[in-house]
Image (spheres, rainbow, N blue to C red):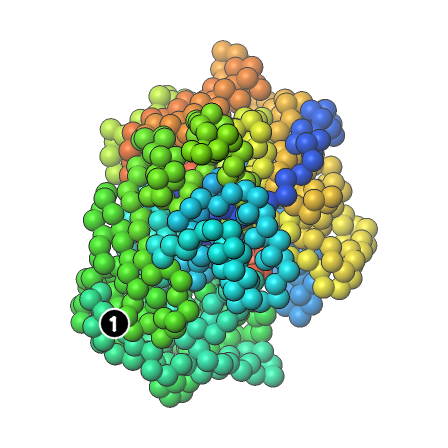
Amino acid sequence: MSKMKKILALVLALMMLVSVLAGCNNADDEKKPADDNPPVDNNPPADDENNPPEDENPPEDVTPEAYTGPDWEAISAMSHDDASWELYEYVLGDYYEAYEAAKAETENLDLRMALMAIAEAKLLESGAFLPNTTNGGRYQMTRLVPRTVSPVLWGLDTYRYHRALVTKELITAEDLAALLEIYGQCATADEYLTKAKEFLAEHNYTLDNTYRSTFTQGPQTWDVIATSQTEDSEYIAGTYDGLMEYDAKIGQQYGLAESYEVSDDGTVYTFHIRKGVKWVDQQGREIGEVTADDWVASMAHLIDNNDQLGYLMTDQGCNIKNYVKYINGEVTDFAEVGVKAIDDYTLEYTLEAPFSPFLTMLGYGCFAPLNRDFYKSQGGTFSVDGDTYTSGNYGTSPETIAYCGPFLVTNFTEGTVLHYETNPTYWNKDAITVTAINYAFNDGSDTTRTWEDAKSGEMIGCSFTNEILTMAKDEIVEGTDKSYFDTYARVSNTDGTTFCGFYNLKRLHWTNYNNESIGVSPQTEEDHTRTRDALANQHFRLALSFGLDRGAYNAVRNGEELKYNNVRNSYVPGNFQYLGSDVTVDINGTPTTFTTGTAYGAITQAQLDADGVPIKVYDAANDTSDGFDGWYNVDNAKAELDLAIAELAQIGVVIDAEHPIQIDYPMASFSSPMAQEAQVYKQSIEATFGGLVVVNLLDFQDVNSYYDCGYRLNDGQNNNYDVYLGSGWGPDYGDAQTYMDTMYPYGYMTKTLGLWGSPDTTEE
């Protein structure tokens, strides 16, 4: 067993793989592949930030040291779990060491943030993946009043629409700007909602009570505790309330809790539950009262679904007392786990150690309440009761869950419609502004449908793809002499989700694991071995990352004018956190002080610069990691490939025009924009390397088979790709750890690298 593995073995013993998203779009753990996002404000950087010079800091042309690559013979004889450890240490060992130091700092939170940022630099330098894009940054037109849905970057509150303001008319770009100015002048969310309503009335807008959007694929489960995928949880969020909820000003307000206290040592949180809140079934019939036991039942259910969100209860999150020990069998009495109902209306969480972001986690699905009696009525059981676990029918449809939130699902017909109406017993129904939500099915095959639906009012708005942008500029608004673009178009803000390109380090499938006729690779057995060796090489991975023109890739959706706006250059957004005090850290042997207010991204950039790695991840002038391409550089890409060629030659891998490296890239041909993006990837990589790398586009003709090649897989050994740009991550809570842990051993996103998944038993 490796040294690294021994260090973590006891902590991670039997820990199940973290599962997705993503991100929550914003805060679910993983981020959804859909690109619709409520339009909000954005300030794009100056044009000269978009195109860094191609010869900026190219790697030095040096003769590589002796190179052996991974010991594939030994790795092939290992279990998947052990092989994952071996490859992880080989590829991400420097990141692991730096991140261990960051996680060990629990007292000085500013020092912790700085160490996290340094660890991210090591993560990016590994070349294991390429940050690519985020949501937003596109021209859009909308009926949604900006910032009336919480703009919080983490959790599920950004999918709670009950207090949104929606108009029947499209809102002009001029009025959107005025509303955002009002937002900036208001101290509270309630003040903004009041003034926004006054503004809308004065400018002849009519409020609508229905939020309208589309869905591509409905939830695979309605059990929010048993999923971490945004494609599920975003549709469940409105069916329940949490203990607390972020408002339009990103302030936490009480939800099902009326108050809370924290112990002096910061480890015990006591919540006082709101009395009289009712659980109802899908028909709105009362089935019980919300009590503290609902969170105890929730934790018991989470333990039975530990491979989904359980990681947030470990030291990869808030570290609930005895959670890991219970999972490992070191503690056998569930009553010793740190969640207790002191009485019907008093709930207590106990942590192993202080964790300052704990309250920021409460908007996520793992802290949703669960009505014990209703769950059991659906055939659900709890292993903590000594029963063999089954969820029965619970969560299999909207009929089989209990509701305590603002909405009931009144119609879900897969492939047709998903409709919600107000919960008649909702405790805060007087505050509801949206009384219905309607999602119409759209598989993306009709590329102009969102445009037509947005104009007619069937949708609250739409993003402008290249095709729609042309129509918006050409079509005149009735009764005016101005185009739709000139009247309504505004650039939306980017958010916390980071979509990435991932490199498969341990590929075992060259067709879809569940259907050998789908996603068939043209590679030969010899190609498999050569590609495996190439992707194990850091210089080759960095070459691929430097060789993708992300501006051209992004222009498919955003158009040339905005092609850089939602390009993201780091994993954790550079403006996600700021120092609250001066901090001095070691940067390559030099004590370096970062002053109060320094952004997370500035520290990551400092470490990258000190290491001489030519990646730009943070634009200090605009306080952002978005809006420019800090990776694409043909000279750097070729220099890295030259280093890779020299190293790989030492292990007998020849790369030349007659022997190119074959890269398989999944192409979603059912979606015109995604298919075009795949073509751009192929053209960009092949042009950069002059035929030394060949990209094969694996054709997926429906959304399910495309998801089955990577996005929905919980086991890294089933991935069918070499490079995959179909997944990402969004934060679960307000600390950089929420991103960084996903690349920790057994972290959720490690499966996109071909590592871990449904793990073997971890060795002691």
Query: Which of 360 and 182 lies nearest the eye of the viewer?
Result: 182
Residue drawn at the location 56% of the way across and 31% of the way down: 563
Specify whether 378 is left or right of 627: left
Q: Quadrant of the C terminus?
A: bottom left
Q: Quadrant of residue 356?
A: bottom right
Residue 95 position in % (x across, y down): 61, 48
Residue drawn at the location 44% of the way across and 58% of the way down: 164
| Residue at which label 1 appears | 280
Query: Which of 60 and 320 lies nearest the eye of the viewer?
Result: 320
Instruction: Count neighbours of disc 1 (C-alpha within 10 A) and say few if under 14, some if 14 to 19, many if 20 or more.
Output: many
17 vs 563: above or below: below
Residue 127 position in % (x across, y down): 58, 37
Residue type indicated by callout 1:
Val
Q: Quadrant of residue 334?
A: bottom left
Secondary structure beneath dot 1 equals strand
393 vs 120: above or below: below
Query: Which of 642 and 347 lies nearest the eye of the viewer?
Result: 347
Residue 604 position in % (x across, y down): 68, 48
